[in-house]
Amino acid sequence: MSTTYSRFQLFFLCLLIAVGFGLRVAVLNTLPLSLSLDEAVNGIDALRLFRAGRLIPFLQNNFGRETLFFYLESLALQLYGISVFSLRFVSALIGTLTIPLLYAVGQRLKLNDLALAKPPSLSMPSMLAATGLAISYWHIYFSRVALRGILLLPLLLGLVWCFWRGWYAHPLSPRSRIGRQRGWLVVAGFLLGLTFYTYLAARLLPLLFIVFVVVELILDRSSLKRRITDFLIFGLASTLTIIPLALYFYQNPQAIGGRTQAISVFGGDAPLQTLGSNLAALFKIHFLGGTWLGQWPALNVLLALGLLIGLVVCVFQIKKAACRFLLLWWVIGVSPLVFSQQNWGATTTILRSILAWPALFLTAAIGLTALANLLFTWITNLRSGTSDLRATNMPPKLIIGFLFLVLTAGALTSLRNYFSVWATTYNKRLDDDAIHLAQFLDSQNNRLSLIPLSLFKESVTFFLLQAGYPNLSNIGTDSLHTLLESNKRAGPEQMSAIYLVTDEPTLESVYVLLAPSANGPGTAYLSPPMTASKIEALFNDMKAASPLSTILNSKQEPIAYVYPLHSDAAFLPDEPMSLQPIQANFNNDVWLTGYHIEPAVAKPGEAVTIYLNWQMQRLIDGDYYLFLHVFDTAQAERRGQSNLPLNSIVHRWSGPLSFLDAYHLWLPPDSPKGVYRFEIGLYHNFSLERLPVIIGEANQPPDDRIILGKFHVQLHPPSPPVYPIHAQFGDSLVLIGGDFLERTLHPDQTLTYTLHWQALASVDRDYTVFNHLLDSEGRIRAQQDGMPQEGRYPTTMWDPGEIVLGTHSILLPSDLEPGPYTLRIGLYEPETGGRLPLVNEAQDFVEVPDFIVLEDAK
């Protein structure tokens, strides 16, 4: 009998694995309908890590994620190719592996001893726990998507099994046996450390084991020294395993708690109200079988009932270590769901409680076993006419039937909930545009395709295109035209090229040219940016031409239009954009190597575009955001700002790459006229800590921002000066005149006037204007020295041909005698005091004689 039922246990466990695997891989390529953002980013990062050839424990982009799962994904992508199925298949395998591991943990915890009955010949609670996990909607869902949290469970179950095996060594065991059991604790510690590389919730596991061990040591002080030593061995093994991650966080402290801070209930407006709502949702999702919370169904009725009874059983048997451990495990495991802000319409909300799932199914199995045994006892008593309330174990055949009942009922419920309810409601809301776009582009294996960068870098599209275009590179204007021209001459069937525009065309300046290769993988080229005039030419070309075809999604809605691309198209960049060179090193991670601003002159309310040329040399880890401020130099006030993620292309690639990004900023309608500049920098998304930046040589002191370029805001070109002068100072500067509107003043008043300067060439020094008021005898009676526009717009910033107006004010002394005065104007270098001479003149100043007449104040 024992052998027969042992074979049945093996058969049933294999059946569970087969059913569980089938539920996790059926139509995996198309259900869910499309890759989510998180899945695609995970796939991209798996490829990046593989190509970089580096072991990195954590990535900060996309809210920060542990990387162990990505390395497993990278192996699958290399073995099976880049596809939706191969990306998700890792999760399906991991989810299936978790089923027998949960059974093994149930056996190790001796669940039969907790189910209010003597152990039967079949391991009913362990079988029920594995069954519950195998047919659980929650676990099926996350075994079908490429999210890293699923990896936590097998490592956690392995950890619990090894810990329990090593912790409960007999105090009188031989030394060799104790050594072997401590070996299990070392393995358990290693697995505990390894869980830290899977998912954020794993950081709660030390709390679980510390609290459990402390309680155990308080309740049982026998062999105290040995048990403390055992726990220290366990802790040391886990600590050594965590060291690489700890070093990473030491070097990148901003990455530690970013995600936690973002979703904590205490970061919201009403934390107590949110806590109450979370507790109500927790009760509903666990105990109100048949209901849905957002897109998440509650546990089925059997599991909900089993969990409720199991919790009661564990509380009543709290003196047993396994009951204490399961209760503590479940409470700590669901705490992330309680203490975080929830959106039950999101696709990952329930995942936050994944730490508690094994405890949930083990506890529910205890409850169902206890309930089944009590019902069997009650029925037996009814038939026999006795009143023995002690639970009696069900016969093996009834246990077999009960197991199949639970398996069938649960599987049918999950099949309905996932493959019918969810698949026909929430799944149909998913957007599969990117998949259809990638399929179309992959099919263009005999012609070039020019697509907007925004389409190319979209996570799902970029990931799927890696199969055909794993290489990403820059291309210059000459090479771009050469490639298009050579493709044109390739032959009748390969002479065409196309370009794509979205259903709602936007102002985009950077495009990507996909160039397939007949001899292997193709290459994606980042094209030179288009200027505003080229973008306008593109729109004109679209209006004049008819699309060759339209790319549709599964709902037959247009995604993009396909147009013919000719090598002489007017909108193609024909010369490199003139960039102002700069060498700005941001934290040795990202370099800014050039910029360009257009237009040079804008009106209030118009858009100003700044092009920034970024360069990366290796895999970029930081989740960097760009702050972009524009301010006017005259009043030093901020007139506009923008905070946005650094171009996601930096998180799509792992090697050297240069890319130019365009940022558009709209000026306020009330912007005053004058000279404006940009202030930019990078900062960490969560901590808001700015990155240090060094301009030029590496030995320069770092700053946290840089000031770039300039443009003018004006409604009309500046009017000519009221009083023409035209005096040239040196080779670069001309005083073309001034506006001297006040001609009669009194003592103690202020003489205010505006000088009109023009730069003939670039100025290599910052000059100061001196303004001297001389009396009829040539004595200086009042003066004012200062850079143009109060030093906010020094002469080194002036462009050749630019006209600059600067206002100056001279306070007249109270004892100034009435009479004629002369204003003397010139330039000098403040460091040396040396004046800039006039060209073709012996003097170094200009005089405006008899211009100011002061009357007697009396």
Image (cartoon, rainbow, N blue to C red):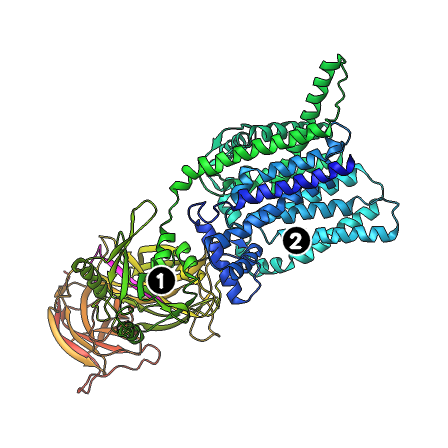
Verify whether residue 770 appears in magenta: no
Q: Residue furthest top?
A: 385
Q: What residue did someone put label 2 on?
A: 193
Foreground of the two, 339 or 10: 10
Q: Position of residue 752 (x, y in %)?
A: 19, 64
Kind of residue at disc 1 = Glu
Q: Position of residue 3 (x, y in %)?
A: 77, 38
Please report the residue visible at 53 percent of the width from the left and 33 percent of the height from the top: 412
Q: Position of residue 837 (x, y in %)?
A: 23, 84
| Quadrant in the picture for residue 754 | bottom left
Q: What residue did someone put label 1 on?
A: 679
Q: Quadrant of the C terminus?
A: bottom left
Foreground of the two, 389 or 446: 446
Q: Position of residue 281 (x, y in %)?
A: 51, 32
Q: Nearer the viewer, mark 1 or mark 2?
A: 2
Q: Is residue 103 above or below residue 379?
A: below
